[in-house]
Every structure is written in structure tokens, then in C-alpha cells.
Image: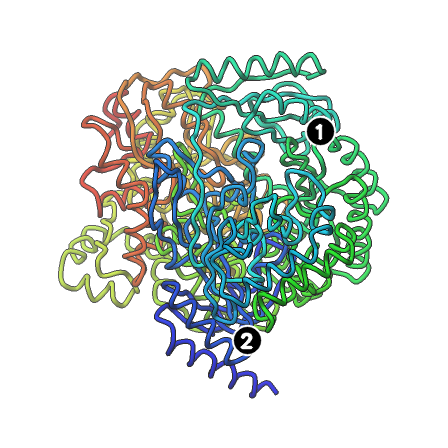
Amino acid sequence: MADRTETEKRDLTKDLAAAVRGEVSSAAADRALMTMDASNYRRVPRAVVAPRDAEDVAAALRVCREHGVPVVPRGAGTSIAGQATGVGVVLDFTRHMRRIVSLDPAARTAVVEPGVILDDLRAAAGAHGLTFGPDPSTHSRCTLGGMIGNNSCGSHSVAWGTTADSVRELELLTYGGERVRAGRGTGPTGAPTGLPPRLRDGVKSLVDAELALLRTGYPDLPRRISGYALDALLPEQGTDLARALTGSEGTLGVLTEATVRLVETPAARVLAVLGYPDESAAAEAAHTLLPHKPMTVEGMAADLVGSAAGLPEGGAWLFVEMGGASPAEAAARAEALCRAAAADGTTGHAVVTDPAGQRALWRIREDASGTATRMPDGSEAWPGWEDCAVPPARLGPYLRDFRALLAQHGLRGTPYGHFGDGCIHIRIDFDLLTPPGIRRFRDFSHDLADLVVAHGGSLSGEHGDGQARAELLPKMYGPELVGLFGRFKDLWDPAAGLNPGMLVRPDRLDDNLRFAPLPGRPVPVEFGYPHDNGDFSAAVRRCVGVAKCRNEKTAAGSADVMCPSFRATGEEQHSTRGRARLLHEMLAGEVITDGWRSPEVHDALDLCLSCKGCRSDCPVGVDMATYKAEFLHHHYEGRLRPAAHYSMGRLPQWLHAAAPAAPAVNALARTPLAAIAKRLAGVAPERPLPALATETFTRWWWRRRRAAPPADGRTVLLWPDTFTNHLSPQVGRAAVRVLEAAGLRPLLPPTAPLPGGALPQPALPRLRRPPLCCGLTYVSTGQLDRARAVMRRTLDVLTPLLAAGRPLVVLEPSCAAALRTDLPELLADDPRAPRLAASVRTFAQTLEDFAPDWRPPRLDRPVAGQTHCHQHAVLGDAADRRLRERAGLTGQLSGGCCGLAGNFGFERGHYDISVACAEDQLLPAVRQSAPGTEILADGFSCRTQLEHLGDRPGRHLAEVLAEALGEADA
């Protein structure tokens, strides 16, 4: 049977490849990437097709009909009800069919292909003062085709409605190959126009026979997304076929082009934040604000918002955006709304006019679909009842009943969402791993559907029914109307070839759960995964598919890093989500069958820069750098590694050995022998080899200390990291100069434990033993046994020295991040590890915490450059920003990753991606900076990338401040 299935798959792939000009693949990696969307469900496709145009779509449908294989259209895969998963052929519209065909500002319309990203359309429309009204939180990566398939809404629906309100005309292909141009209105016979005769007559007959049911069977509320919108075909509704097909989840036709309505965007926007005692009070108040014509009325409670700055007093808040022709008008409208709301019992309010402040608050809301997947105690929470909607005036009572139902079933969740439209989002701590937990999930779903219907609501208020809710549609619509849905489906898709199992005759809501094939017990791993109870499967499950890592551009004013390799390649497998999906399938063992030896996972992780950006920027804290290190450890266990792992992975050893012969090594690096050495070491031929310091930082330190012992002051331990010691000793010398000027007493740790935790003395032997190491290069190449050994040696030496509360000052951000996170997570069994991690300080944090009264020299010039990606992700740069401000260094550093990323950019085969990452943010920021701008780059990799690719060198902040203090000691 398996051989027959493989033969059929090969024949299907062969025929598709012959018929379609776009990419066709049945490879395990490509299929694995499409098994899931952002829901609880998983279905394995046979093949993936990326059509180039409508003719490709028609050809793919023809081949699939001939093979009797179903088809699933897919956009960005952020659907939450399972409708973007499928067992047949997935049509991936995100690669090619993403043109904005035309944009007519006068008519306020745009013609788009289904793969157009919403933010791209909004940017094009914005040049004319227009926008596309619906704006789900995934606006930076969701596609128009997906929005039309789900009838998406977003936070501005109180002003501009749902996607169905913005659709004018749709071009589709049915599974049978019929071409449809669906719009509004009827022909001479009273039937919808743009249909082939079979469909035209069938739709008219169905509507004419069921007028009474269509007029009485639907609840009247703004967020009614569930089921087919067949009431749009009523004569009094204008026989709007385009509206009726919007929200059909790819079950009736495959969209190839859409004409959509654009709306005028206000010249100015102001955000009013209203505080309430609790979420029930906020829910009760939301609908009373609608007469003020707000653009948004979004609700969140303290258990989601946390300690966000800029919020007034309260336990829950409404974010209400007001527009105006000018900032003054928008602010006046916001103030008037706040005064009116105060009369109804707010606990406080704030009017945020600053665009940066508004973006920071909106980011909390937009990230909620990810952050809500973890409860305050770290337990997992899942979608499934993500977006029920009730009449806005019923939201308060519904929310109270909803909370009571959660308690009745012993469940927890964090509601938030579109309070002004009566739509609630929530992730619930369902146990979807065990049979009893799955039964509870099913029982709760039935009870909640009853509750929603009792309040006059819709099972879906935004994300569609898919598999999550379609089984329960008879509770909302009754069997007669649901039967009509089935007849409508059969009329359009008699072969049931489009997205079967969704919406009509659906799979059960507890079938196809994505967790079912995962191992029942934790797999043996090296890292501790403290936030996932040591369970690698739970760590991988963190990725719920919201796909923030698929952002192709960084938002204005954002310092985000994630995901540089996706922005460079545009390929799903090189996104954080794509890699997490492949790891999930590796653990499942159905599509990816080689476990830790998997070439598919290895290839996807090969272009992961280990920038750690996902650790902070991913709403659910996926940590792909750690997962990559874990995978590489197991992948190469007992096997020969790539040359780069032996050369750059063990860089601290080689640099220590080469230090005495640095002049000779540097001379050889300038001869033709360097090319041979690079080839043998796995180094990219395009990369110059960095020059070794002829005097290491540690040698300079001991020479200087013998000549002049340090002055008194609070002792801080200065970490002599490999890069500073052997490649950038000037940074270490500058840091010593600044720390001493600030009244501190920097000392270097010894290379071996001293009795009683004594501090090192000038007469101690130096440089006989290998220096201490954070283990960074071993971790990044997955040599975790060696990493653990060097880290334990570091703990042995440092623990006694840090007992007195001394900070460990680390100048290289990547080494600081390794000591702060990798060390305690790799040595999870050593109680000394978290104490060392807690002692780590950056250069700026040390000055702020231990020399708070020191005033740096004034430099009064602008800065450009980049915050190191590891500092952004692990350590934060708030202290650096404050130090720069005190020194008169103005401006912001860019986000992103430099692309060199330690060993990554030096490895053979990575050069082009490394350059593309640098061109994303770093190099443009430096090129665009004015003459006289100080270029800051605290990381050795960042400075090296600038040296190789730019014409303006970067410096560590310590170097800039030391220069202003005067000449450092020789």
C-alpha cells in the first residue's frame, strides 16, 4: 500500500510539473512546511504548487481532477481554524501571485492577486491617502486571498467593516475548471452575472426556493463570519455574489484576482486609552463608545498587558483610536471621548499623540495572538475558540457567562479583542495531548457553542469556521440552513475537490490534532529548556504559526531582529516558523523520517544565523538558536563534522595557540597560502581573515598592572572574551580607561581557581593555561559536550570571585548573552550557573548600576550603526541608550542583524545571505548617515561586517568614550 501511495504521489508530481510553470514539489521538506497553519490542526499534503498566474492555477486544477486529488488554496498560513491545511495539493500563492494589478485612486479601488500582502497594498494605497480597511493583527504578512477566504476583519472593523464590506469583484476557478467573475447585481433573468450557465441557473433556483429561510436564518450582528453568507444573494441585498463567496474558505472556488474597495484614511490619529476596574466593566462600556465614531475599540486586561508603560490605572483597558483632519482635531475628539467615558466609570485615561508611543501600545495588541499562548505560570494555551462574537451590547453579560463556563470545565484563558464589535479572542489551556483532555476540549466546545447562540452570537467572528467550529454550525443555524450550505457547496464543487473537511460536512473538531503524532515522552536533550519543563517537544510546540517571523520589512521605528534569513530569502523554510514546523515533523516522524539525522531540518537550520532575535521578537518566545545548537549536537554525534566546526567552532583554542606567533600568522594571511587555509577551514573565499592582535588584551593588562596597580574603587570583574582578547584588544583597553574614570576598579579573572576566592595578583603566572571561555563558538556549532566542559571550568574559577556581589562586565554582547542564557540552560544541573548568569552586566549596565553618579564626556554628535542582535534579544539596550543620551550621542541605532553573526558569515556558502542581511538595515543606515556621525557597533561581528562591506568603520561605545577622556594608557 505504501509503495502504491508513493507511486501515485510521483505520478501526480510529474504531471503537475509538466503542466505548471511555477514550482512543484512533493519533497518531504516542502510538504512538512505546509502541514499546519496557526490552528490546532495538522494535515499532510501530497504536493505543493506555487502557481505563477491564473493559467497555472487552471492547469493544476485540471491535473488534480484527473488524479482525483483535492486542492487547498493557501496564503500566509495564519488561519486559526485549520482551513489552510490539506491532504491533497496545496496551492501556495505567496511566491508569485502577489501583484497589485492596478490601483485607481479616483474610484478608490485596487485589483490584486491573491498573494498580495496586506501591508503592501496599504503602502501603495497610502501614497494616495487611502487604505484597505480591514487590518488583522497579521497585517504585515497575511495575504488578500487569505483575508477574502476567511472574511477577515481587524481592529478597525467598527469603522470600515469586514473584508466582505470591501470586496467588489472576485475572479475564481472552480474545481471543475469553470471561470467565475463574481460581483453584485443580476442579469435579465434575475440570476447573478458572471457565472457559467450551470452555476447561474443553479444559484438562482436555490435562492428562489429558499427566500424565507435566507431572510430569517441569520443573526443580525457586525461580526457574523460563520457559514456561507447566502443572505447576500437576496434581491434586497443586491444579489451580491462576491460577498456571498467571501468567507467561503476555499471550499467553492480558487481565487485568482480580486477588485477591492479602498477607503480614505484620516490625516491624523490619536489613541485614547481608557482604564476600567476589570474586563467586565470594559466590555460593558465598549458599545457605549460607538456613537463617538471611533476607528477602533479594542479591549485587553491586565493578565495580557502586564506592566506595559503608558497605561492609566486599571485592571483592563480599551484602546480607542480617533481620527481627524489634523492632530489637533483628532486629539480634541479623543479628549471628548475620554470625558464622556469618565462619566460612566473609568479608572483613568491617557491620550497618546506620539506615533512611537501608539506603536508601542498597538504592538501589545498585535502580539496578543502569540503571547496569549502561554499562561502566567508558563502552561500552554491554544486556539479553537479564538473569535466568537455576540451583539456588542451583550458582550458584558456574555463575558461573565464565558468566564463561569471556563471555571465549570476547570479551564483558564485570557480574553482580549474587538470589544466594540462584540468579538472576543482567547487562548485556553486545553490539554490536547491526552484523551481526557481532548474529551474536555470537545465537551467545552459544545457548551460554549450553546452559550454563544444563547447570546445571539456567531461561532466565528473573524477567523472562519474551518474544522474548529464547522461541526457545531447546526447549533447556530439549525439543520435546515446548514443543509442549504451543503447544497450550495455541491452546486459549486460536486466532486468535493476543494478543501474537503472544512465548513461543509466537516471533520470532527477533535480530529487531525497536530499534537497527536508527537512523542508521548520527552526526548533526551542537552539544554534544560527551563520555560518548557525540560521538554524539547513543548519548546517546539511554542510555535503556533502566527508568523511574525515572515515579516518582509521591519516596521518604522522598530528595533526588531527576527527573522533575517527569511527577509533575505523569502522562503518559508528559512523563517523561524518554517524551522519550527520541520522540527515538529522531525519529532512526529511521519514526513521527516530520519530524526536528528534529517537532512531537511539540517538544510533549513543551515541558514539560521543564531541571531537569537526570535527569543525576544517572537510573541511566544521560540528560541531557534538554541534549537539549532541542540539539533547540530545530535546530528553530528559520532560523525565527522564540517570543517568550519573544527576551525571556527573551536576558535578560542586556535587563537590561544596562535597568539605567540601572531605577526607570522598575520603575514601568512596576506599570502596565497591564505586561500588554501580558508578552503581547508571551510571559510568563505570572499572573506579576508581577521588580523590577530600582536599583543593580546590580557597581556597588555598584566603588563600595565605590574607597572601601575589599579587605584581603589569598587571592584568589577572584566571578562576577557576571545574576540576582545585576540582580535579587538583596543576595546578592552578603552573599557578599562572608562571604568577607571568612573571610579571603578576593573580586574581580570585568573585562568584557574584561587584559594578562598582571592583576587588575582600581579605576580601570578600568566597565559600558561587556556583563558576562560563562555562557550559561545562551541554552542553555535552544536559542540555541546565541549561547551559544557569550558563552561564548568568558567564556573569553577568565577563562582568564588562573584560571591561578594561583584558584577561580571562583558564587552562582547554575544559572549554576554551566552553567559546569561546558554550557560545556565546548558548547565541546568549546576546551581552555580544561575548565580553567574545574574552577575553578567554589559558595559553600559555596569556604569549605570555601579557608577550612577559618573557623568560621561559630552560628545554632541549623531550616531548610526546597529544594536547587536544578541543584546537586543537577551540583554536589552536601555542602559546603552541612556548612556548615549548622557554623552550627547543622538539618534537611534538600527535593528536587524549584521549578517556576519559570528561563524555564520565566515562559513563557505553563506556569503551572499550574510551580505543580504547586512543590506537589510545596517549598511543602509550607515550609508544614509551624515558626515561626522559616529558609527557604533559593540559586537566584533558587526564591526567586521562593516569593515568588509562598508567604507565607514564602527567602534565600540567604550572606544568612543575613552577617546573623549583622552589617550588611554599605552
- How would you rate the neighbour count of disc 2 (Cα within 10 Å): few for under 14, some for 14-19, many for 20 or more? some
Q: Is residue 764 visible?
A: no
Q: Which residue is mark 1?
A: 283
Classify mark 2: helix, strand or loop. loop
- What percent of the width, then of the height, locates residue 579? 49, 59
- What percent of the width, then of the height, locates residue 796? 54, 46
User: Is 593 left or right of 438, judged from the image as shown?
Assistant: left
Q: Which mark identifies residue 69?
A: 2
Which numbered disc, 1 or 2, marks the residue closer to the eye? 2
Q: How is the model colour-coded?
A: rainbow
Q: Amino acid at mark 2?
A: Val
Q: Amino acid at mark 1?
A: Ala
Displayed quadrant of residue 37:
bottom right
Q: Residue at x 30, y 35 (%)?
A: 865
Q: Which mark identifies residue 789?
A: none
Image vertical order of residue 782 relative to residue 4, above or below: above
